[in-house]
Structures are given as C-alpha cells and as structure tokens.
Amino acid sequence: MADISFPPMEQLQDLEYCIDSNPPWAETMLLAFQNYLLMLGTSVMIPTILVPAMGGSDGDKARVIQTLLFVAGINTLLQALFGTRLPAVVGGSFAYLIPIGYIINDSSLQRIPEPHERFIQTMRAIQGALIVASSVQIILGYSQLWGLFSRFFSPLGMAPVVGLVGLGLFQRGFPALGNCVEIGLPMLLLVIGLSQYLKHIRLVRDVPIFERFPLIICATVVWIYAVILTAAGAYRNKPSHTQASCRTDRANLISTAPWFKFPYPLQWGPPTFAAGHAFAMMSAVLVSMVESTAAYKAASRLAIATPPPAYVLSRGIGWQENSGQFLLPFHSPYSLQYIVFFLALWLQLGYHSYSSLT
C-alpha cells in the first residue's frame, strides 16, 4: 500500500506542522524557547502563591522554581520516550493548590513560630501526602484500570473539569495584573493584538512571525519597557507593594538562586504522613488524571496522530507519577495549555502513528 500523507492544513486550519513534521532548526529553537517562557510563567506563579504562605523566603522560592522546572523536564522526557510518546510538555497543575492550601493552614503547622522551619515541615507534609496519593495513580495506571475507566469519559465530562480548574484560579491570576497596570495591561493587549489580529502579517520570508512568536516578541518589548520605567525612577516614591510588583530589580530570584543546584530526592527532609493530608491530595490526583486524559486526546488530535488507545492512556498516567513524587511536592501532571509541539520539534521526533510506536 502506498504511503498516503495528508498535509496538516487539509485537516486543521492554520496548522502548518504536525507530528511528523521537521521545521527548520532556527525556527525549532525559537519555538522551544517560547514554550520555555510559557512554562516559566506557571513555574513561577505556583511557588509565588504558595511558598510565602508556608513561611519560605525568596531563596526558598527560587529553589522551588528551579526544582519545578527540573522535574517538568524529566517528566516531559519520560512521557516522550516511554509514556504516551506524544509531543506535549508536562507542567505544574493548579489542581493541587486547594489541597496544598489545606495542608498549609493545618493548625499543627501554623503553630511553628520560626518561618523557615514551618516552610520545611510544610514541604515535608505536602510531599508525604503526594507520595501516598500518587501511589494510587501509579496503581491505576500500570494495572490498566484507568484505561478501562477512560472509556466512559467524553468531552462533555472532561471539558468542564478542566475548565473549572483554570477558571477557578481566575480570581488569583487576573487581579495580579492590577498590581501593576502600566506593565500588565500593555502586555495583555500586545499579546492579544499580535496573536489574534496581526497573525496573518508576514514581514520576513513569508513567515507569520506575529502568530508564531507572539510571546517572545511581547515579553521582550514589555521587559525593555519595564526596565526603562525602573531606571527612570517611575516607582521611586511608590508604596512597597507597587515596587515589588512593577520594578524589575525587586524579585530577588536571581540574586538568591545558587549558580548550580541539582535537585535530589527528599531534599527537604524525610516526608511526614497524615491521613487527612493524603485524602485531600487524592482529590487533586483524581482531577489531574481527568485533566491529563483530556490533554492526551487533545494532543493526539492537534498532532494529527491516531487517538491514544486505552493501554497508552494507562501507561501515560503511570509514568506521569514516577519522577515527581520524591523531588517536588507541587507535582507535574499534564496541563492543557502546554499541548504544544515545541519540545517534540526541538528533539526532531518524527512519529507517524501510534501503531508504529507501541
């Protein structure tokens, strides 16, 4: 039988690359870096919300961000090589914020007077709860039970779960833009304008650079704009909260981060276990499993690949838990906003179909 291929544009409009495409190396590297910037936003936002509530310092926050990025990279490689083998990036999930917030507010932890000691004990408690909860997911994945359950999932069931996880955090994320309107609002308008209204403009070599690289362009322009405002003294007499949100020299992440840090298992000490913490974390694990299942199916659709069968879904769920549970309590399940092809294109992985992979 002749090898029949269908160009991506014939199946999904405005899609130029699919799972077996090999774009130029220069464009591949730019797309990979852009996706890193996208990952960096979530990797910074989650510790920024949680670490101060635990009593952690700027140095603790930098260490957590480093570990989150490291674990996300490991999980992505494991999924690309042994899990679902889909070109998707694994990142932190907001589904874990509510159970982690419950653990942070535990009275036994809140009674610890010293902030750094409270941070260490909280991290150990979160890690213990995650180890127990993720063990359930590993069992469901490798036993193929999740593949059987996934047959009863439909878009009408999965879409509300994933949507509520993201929309539930709207009150946390979007109001942060108001902390520095003169920087946040131009960034928002610029991203929308370039990616939605100027996407068909081709300035260089007939490449839609505004559609393909909006985040790189916007982040560069707005960061230079923020540096100019900081250097010009626009926030010199502003309240400390405004300076912390707007100035480019007040995050203290670079100055407090070590030049080289290799995350290792149980780096915050041996985990502690509590039944209430474990059951709270199990609820987030179940939500993340539904979220990941929806992400697998969406990724295969966007990659123009064969829909993942039940045993591939189970294998992906099982591999999803292997590397993160001993390294980082914030975990790294799939997240729908990271269903992109940049990593797979970066590695030049040409996957033709699931039948040739498994």
Image (spheres, rainbow, N blue to C red):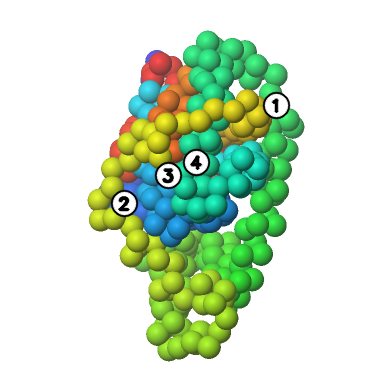
Mark 3 and 4 residues: CB-CB less than 8 Å, in contact?
no
Whether residue 108 is visible to the viewer of this picture, yes or no, is: yes
Question: Type of residue at label 1?
Answer: Ser
Q: Earlier in the sequence, mark 1 or mark 2?
A: 2
Q: CA distance from mark 3 to mark 4?
A: 19 Å
Disc on the earlier residue, 3 or 4 = 3
Residue 198 image offset from top left, x and y in percent: 53, 67
Q: Secondary structure at mark 4?
A: helix
Q: Secondary structure at mark 1?
A: loop
Q: CA distance from mark 1 to mark 2?
A: 35 Å
Structural distance between the alpha carbons of marks 1 and 4: 40 Å
Cα separation, mark 2 vs mark 3, equals 22 Å
Tell me which amino acid carries mark 2.
Answer: Met
Task: Give the residue at x 53% y 88%.
Answer: 237
Q: Is residue 147 visible from the viewing direction of this image?
A: no
Residue at 42 percent across and 31 percent down: it is 270
Q: Position of residue 173 (x, y in %)?
A: 62, 58
